[in-house]
């Protein structure tokens, strides 16, 4: 009897997992959309414990994401290893100075990664690479069918071409492999190709990335096909379990084999609360085994479970994600340049993080840009990774003008966010909570605070409620207001990302020399 790992293995916004094993090392990368740095790289030696070790996209010179819309940006990477080199392919959606599919390489997955090479004639999204055992390399992608049947307007092609490793371009004829396993399949996408026991196995997602998401498979004797579907399709889905099931939208799977011959599948899913999810699409794991030449995912149960037995975990123990430990940022660790790699900013504009002007503090120069705009405001955020969590910071921002704000933000997208911030209230400064939903902006609450010194602010998430508080001079926490989290859910706001909790400052369109210093941040899981 072995111990177990808990699901999700990467909680919070970690969608579209791709996994690659080299020897005893496993590397996992997920999508990041408009957030930067992009494509976080996680490492494990046992598939149970994961460590965030870097990002594949960490330099503006690699690609420019300025102006990318919410849920544009970096879609569905694939990580592979061939002949001593790691390869990554991904899609940049809505890029204004380059868009489409690209490839990059590295000697080590933690980086540094090369600049991107754009792939000509690589139509669509969700690119993937496959290196055959004869030395040939292949590129797969997903795109809308050029001439769909009138009854099936959302049919897509899974297509394949040779990939020239030397020129980093596609060559040779194109082969359309598959259109999805189910009749009138919506968005057959996310292809991954494997060779097992001499046969080629194609794994895709279909049904859309909401509650009807699913994993389906097909196989062929030749890499170019023809491919035949498994009669057991879909091989993993939660579409039949209902909207009130604790895990929903399961799909977009990647298979990986361990040195011991055991197989595993990593897939995305969501954890809704009363039909709404705020954490985004997360990464889950299930065991896999082979029967009659086909993969069986989550054998015996057929679904993602909260705990998964794992031979690398001692009997009676449960390995939980590193994110389940409280996190404190003092901006003083020289090993990270004063800033943990857990932080994200928006897009690739000038970095708002300044950890050198005041040692032990994060200085945000107030920028005219706000969270409403598709640019890079003075915002740094952490993924919300738990249904119940507390995010707190100490903010120093003396002498703010009436139009200036500095404090905390709960961001889902440009049009849906909440801000708890200091501002000038005339007779005294105040802490104000403002909710933005589309074109509607609502002041939820205000709290006068005397003086001009540091202020402790915090936001507590409790399933579908966010409570915003400030600490009074007497040390007591006082509620400024509460926000119904459904206003920030994917079901309300749309898009593909999850909530980020962050620090934020703005001069709201005005030029200024004002700054805000953040001297202490904590993220504490309360589940």
Image (cartoon, grey):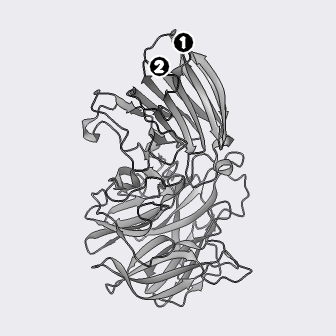
Circle 2 is placed at which residue position? Answer: 455
| Disc 1 residue crowd, few under 14, some 14–19, many 20+, Cα 10 Å | few
Q: Residue 366, percent across and down?
A: 42, 32
- Residue drawn 36% across the image and 38% down it: 353
Q: Residue 23, percent across and down?
A: 30, 67
Q: Residue 278, percent across and down?
A: 61, 45
Side of 176 where 18 appears, left or right: left
Circle 1 is placed at which residue position? Answer: 428
Q: In this view, does 481 lie above or below 108?
A: above
| Disc 2 residue crowd, few under 14, some 14–19, many 20+, Cα 10 Å | many
- Mark closer to the chain start, 2 or 1: 1
State which quadrant residue 208 falls in.
bottom right
State which quadrant residue 476 falls in.
top right
Q: What element carries label 1?
A: loop
Rendered-image quadrant of the C terminus = top right
Residue 205 tag number = none
């Amino acid at each position: 009897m072995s111990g177990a790992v808990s699901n999700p293995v990467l909680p919070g916004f970690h969608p579209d997992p791709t996994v690659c094993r080299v020897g005893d090392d496993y590397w996992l990368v997920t999508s990041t959309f408009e957030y930067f740095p992009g494509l976080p790289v996680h490492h494990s030696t046992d598939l149970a414990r994961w460590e965030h070790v870097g990002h594949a996209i960490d330099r503006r010179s690699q690609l420019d994401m300025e102006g990318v819309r919410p849920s544009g940006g970096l879609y569905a990477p694939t990580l592979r290893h061939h002949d001593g080199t790691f390869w990554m392919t991904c899609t940049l959606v809505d890029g204004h100075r380059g868009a489409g599919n690209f490839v990059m390489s590295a000697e080590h997955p933690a980086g540094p990664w090369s600049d991107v090479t754009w792939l000509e004639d690589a139509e669509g999204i969700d690119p993937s690479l496959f290196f055959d055992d004869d030395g040939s390399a292949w590129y797969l992608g997903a795109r809308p069918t050029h001439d769909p049947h009138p009854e099936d307007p959302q049919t897509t092609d899974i297509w394949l071409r040779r990939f020239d490793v030397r020129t980093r371009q596609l060559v040779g004829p194109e082969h359309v492999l598959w259109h999805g396993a189910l009749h009138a399949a919506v968005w057959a996408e996310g292809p991954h190709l494997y060779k097992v026991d001499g046969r080629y196995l194609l794994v895709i997602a279909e049904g859309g990335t909401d509650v009807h998401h699913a994993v389906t498979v097909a196989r062929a004797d030749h890499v170019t096909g023809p491919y035949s579907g498994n009669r057991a399709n879909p091989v993993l889905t939660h579409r039949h379990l209902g909207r009130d099931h604790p895990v929903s939208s399961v799909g977009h799977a990647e298979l990986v084999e361990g040195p011991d011959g055991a197989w595993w599948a990593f897939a995305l899913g969501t954890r809704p609360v009363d039909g709404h999810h705020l954490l985004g699409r997360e990464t889950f794991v299930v065991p896999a085994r082979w029967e009659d030449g086909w993969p069986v995912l989550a054998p015996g149960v057929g679904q993602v479970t909260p705990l998964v037995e794992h031979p690398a975990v001692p009997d009676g123990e449960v390995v939980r994600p590193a994110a389940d430990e409280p996190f404190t940022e003092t901006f003083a660790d020289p090993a990270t340049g004063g800033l943990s790699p857990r932080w994200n900013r928006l897009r690739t504009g000038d970095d708002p993080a300044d950890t050198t002007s005041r040692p032990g503090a994060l200085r945000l120069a107030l920028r005219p840009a706000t969270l409403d705009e598709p640019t890079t405001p003075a915002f740094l955020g952490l993924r919300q990774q738990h249904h119940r969590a507390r995010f707190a910071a100490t903010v120093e921002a003396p002498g703010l003008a009436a139009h200036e704000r500095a404090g905390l933000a709960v961001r889902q997208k440009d049009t849906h966010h909440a801000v708890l911030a200091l501002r000038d209230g005339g007779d005294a400064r105040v802490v104000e909570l403002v909710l933005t939903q589309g074109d509607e902006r609502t002041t939820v609450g205000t709290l006068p605070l005397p003086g001009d010194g540091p202020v402790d602010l915090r936001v507590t998430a409790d399933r579908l409620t966010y409570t915003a508080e400030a600490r009074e001079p007497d040390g007591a926490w006082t509620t400024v207001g509460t926000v119904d989290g459904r206003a920030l859910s994917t079901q309300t706001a749309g898009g593909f990302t999850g909530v980020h909790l962050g620090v934020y400052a703005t001069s709201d369109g005005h030029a200024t020399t004002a700054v805000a210093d953040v001297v202490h941040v904590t993220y504490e899981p309360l589940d």
